[in-house]
Amino acid sequence: MNHSNKRFGTRAVHAGQRPDPTTGAIMTPIFQTSTYVQDAVGSPRDGYDYARVKNPTREALQGNLAALENGKHAAAFSAGLAAMDTLFKTALNAGDHLICGADVYGGLDRQLRHVWARFGVEFDFVDTTDPEAIKNALRDETRLVHVETPSNPMITITDIEACAQIAHDAGALFSVDNTFATPYLQRPLDLGADVVMHSTTKFLNGHSDMIGGALMTNSDELAEAFRFQQKTTGAVPGPFDCWLVLRGTKTLHLRMPAHCSNAARIAELLDEHADVGDVRYPGLAHHPQHELAKRQMNGFGSMVSFDLGSEERANRFAGLTELFQLAESLGGVESLVSIPSSMTHGSVPEEKKKEIGLTPGLVRLSVGVEDIEDLVADIRSALEKL
Ligand SMILES: *Cc1c(COP(=O)(O)O)cnc(C)c1O
């Protein structure tokens, strides 16, 4: 059955999947195999010749993810960073130029500085909350513009439609890291992006029990290139990890509203507290891109950042919460607290941290789906003890 004409929740549950033709098993089996028997030389069944190239559990996940992003194609990878690595390998050659949002996942900053720079790829980090800044950074060699919105960890919002237009006018591709929003809240392909990237590790899996990534696109040519990279450089996810993401996406449309309403309540609580500065949540009326977020997203997500004034206070706070456990990562059903400056963004140069306003006192919350009154009590109690 084709589910592409169905609504989001129905696609989340069904797209990409069908009962197993052999047994009728309703859940896609975990095809834990490296190779497939061929009937004769050169005639693998339906392209199944080796599991790096094609695996039925991965195919099901890719079909599901493509449907959720309103895309024609998806390619799954062994990590979000492997998906980014694949996108760069596909879009850029030595001497080409990339414009990358200034406030992006710390690991992406590391990949650009320590891997891609060695291969002659040029890049500039640009504050994409101002699309004009992208115009000013364009060069003849610019082949790709990549943004994260909402961004990590400063929770800024970038205008996807405006940036896609600028990139396309310059003959460059435009990609969006949609990890923080998820396709439930925002669908960049519909707004003109060529590629959507996900760390499936986060909300799509939703249960903090695997690492994975994905690239979605409407372009047959890019999809072919992504599949070529899966086959040729091999950063593919194992079938069990694909199965775990598939289990997660089935409840994405149920989890996200709970994440959003819990986060909104926590953001308000922090915003009203005298000892807390600079609360960053797109749902707050004073967020600099609140109007844009309202237009571009179907909700404001579950990531909240705020400033406690010093590293010492931020670290102490992270030790005082009980339900909000101290850990990197985000997007699971459980609430987490992290200190970006020394944790996820530890490898970002100090100078750049200053530029984007990433202070040592910044605290980032991933608000889970626990009972909100317990989460509120946990934050209140930690702030009191502070
Ligand atoms: C976690 C994350 C990544 C990296 O993904 P991995 O699955 O950890 O490799 C990239 N972008 C964002 C926004 C992330 O949160």
Image: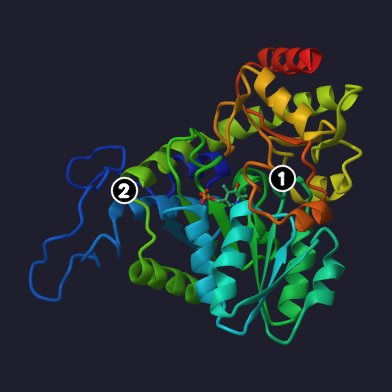
| Residue nearest the observer in this picture, 344 or 369 | 344
- The residue at the point 47 percent across, 70 percent down is 223
Q: Is residue 132 above or below residue 252?
A: below
Q: Which residue is mark 2?
A: 239
Q: Quick check: can you spot residue 331?
A: yes
Q: Is residue 135 above or below residue 22?
A: below
Classify 10 Å Cα crowding around label 2: few (below 14), some (14-19), many (20 and above): many
Q: Is residue 44 above or below residue 58?
A: below
Q: Which residue is mark 1?
A: 153
Residue 339: which quarter of the image?
A: top right
353 displayed left or right of 148: right
Residue 90 percent coordinates (x, y): 51, 74
Q: Earlier in the sequence, mark 2 or mark 1?
A: 1
- Split into 4 quadrants, where in the image is the C terminus? top right
In the rendered structure, which amino acid carries the disc numbered 1?
A: Pro
Of the two numbered discs 2 and 1 in the rendering, the one whose residue sits closer to the viewer: 1
